[in-house]
Every structure is written in C-alpha cells, then in structure tokens.
Amino acid sequence: MAGARSAAGDQCKLARCAALLQLAQPGEGLEPVYAFDENAGATADWSANRYRLPTEAEWEYAARERGGPKRFGDGSNTADPARINFDASVDGKQPYSMAGDFRGKTVPVDSLEAPNALGLHDMSGNVWERY
C-alpha cells in the first residue's frame, strides 16, 4: 500500500533522528539518551541529560498549548495552509481544513505564520506528509 507506515520504518527514522541529536550536543559529562542495537533497535534512557526527542505525550502537551482542547499545534481547530504545512490542495481538503497551497515538501522552521501561545513554531504538519 503506497504511503503505508511500518514499525520498522518508524524505528529507522527514530534512530536517524536520535543519532543526529547525539551528534548535535557533544560535551563532557552528558549522558546519551539513546542507545542503538542492531537487534533491539533504538532504546532510550529518559533520565539522561542530553537533548532528546519529546515523547508523544510531551509533544501533544506542547502542541495543544499545555494540553488544551486545540486540534492543531498552531492553537486553532482549523488547519490553515498559511499556518500549517499540509496537503491543502482541493483534493486534500477535509472538513477541519482550509484549501490552499500544497507545497509538497517541508519548509524551513519559522517560515509559516505565528507560533502557538507557548511560542512554539511548526507543531503541526511539515513532516508527516513526507513519510
């Protein structure tokens, strides 16, 4: 099935992202959060002190402005292509979205309109559609 996601594919992407985070923060006394094993895949030590990817719950909390009832990470309940990068083409239109540009690629961080109430940019869209 085209576009189907797999656990193995997700694990591979997680491993790549985690490896980049480890490289991005070299330093003495910093314990790696992620470990990699060919058989076990990526594992995490959440008590370690290096940068890490947020858990799904942490991401939701931040995207929904401290866990509020917002549908999207820009603080709204309607996906607006000026604020979120998603398939906003007429064919991709959903009841909760506005039609507009379909960029078909990721965009640079902070290139869309305003952040959410916590000052976080691009908390919805921009990646999911690409993988």
Image (spheres, grey):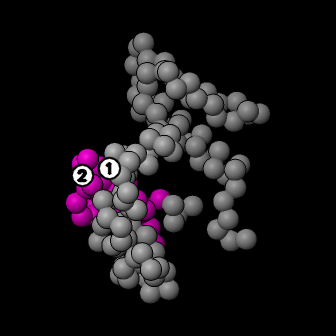
In the image shown, does 68 or 94 lie closer to the viewer? Answer: 68
Say if 73 sits above or below 89 in the image. above
User: In this picture, is 98 found above or below 106?
Assistant: below
Element at label 2:
loop
In the image, the segment drawn in magenta is 103-127
Instruction: Give the side of residue 95 with respect to residue 74, left or right.
Output: right
Rendered-image quadrant of the C terminus: bottom right
Distance CA(mark 1)–CA(mark 2): 6 Å
Residue drawn at the location 43% of the way across and 25% of the way down: 50
Res 101 seen here: yes
Q: Position of residue 86 (x, y in %)?
A: 43, 70
| Residue furthest right in the image | 39
How packed is label 1: few (under 14 Cα within 10 Å), some, or many (20 or more)? Answer: many
Q: Is residue 107 magenta?
A: yes
What residue is shown with label 1? 65
- Horizontally, is 33 left or right of 2 in the view? left
Q: Is residue 109 visible?
A: no
Which is more toward the observer, 56 or 68? 68
- Give the main secondary structure of the magenta stretch: loop
Frontmost residue, 101 versus 118: 118
Which one is earlier in the sequence, the residue at label 1 or at label 2? 1
**Residue 92 in the image: above or below residue 54:** below
Where is mark 2, residue-wise?
Answer: 117
Report the number of numbered marks: 2
User: Residue shown at 68%/71% (left/top)?
Assistant: 2
Q: Amino acid at mark 2?
A: Ala
